[in-house]
Amino acid sequence: MWPLNVLNNIWFLLFWAGLSIRVNLLEFSEDSKFLLGSGEDSLLYIWDILSGEVVYGQRFDKPVSVVK
């Protein structure tokens, strides 16, 4: 879970399904509509910011720490 400043400086605490081990990477999309996250469990997720739903998930051979 991460605090997310959504509108008018009001802070919400959102619970995101997916990562359950140490997080290596969190990155917002350029349009701030999506959040990408990856952890030590080698799972990579992309969440829709407005709904909090996972729109993409994949397990890799090694933990992901850089996205280009």
Image: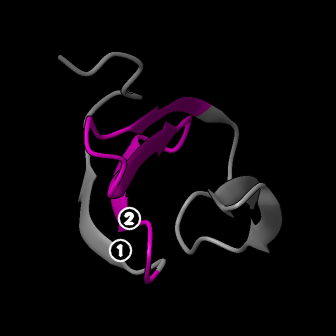
Write the residue at 56% across / 75% down.
17
Q: Which numbered circle lies on residue 54?
A: 1
Q: Which numbered circle lies on residue 47?
A: 2
Residue 64: quarter of image:
top left
The secondary element bearing badge 1 is classed as strand
Q: Quadrant of the C terminus?
A: top left
Residue 50 placement (x, y as % from top left): 44, 76
Q: Is residue 67 left or right of residue 35?
A: left
Q: Nearer the viewer, residue 52 or 43?
A: 52
What span is in magenta?
A: 24-51
Where is 40 relative to 17, above or below? Answer: above
Residue 6 placement (x, y as % from top left): 62, 62
Q: Nearer the viewer, residue 45 or 34?
A: 34
Residue 27 placement (x, y as % from top left): 43, 33
Q: Which numbered circle lies on residue 13?
A: none
Residue 29: quarter of image:
top left
Task: Reply yes or no: does residue 66 show up in magenta.
Answer: no
Q: Amino acid at mark 1?
A: Val
Q: Amino acid at mark 2?
A: Trp
Residue 51: quarter of image:
bottom left
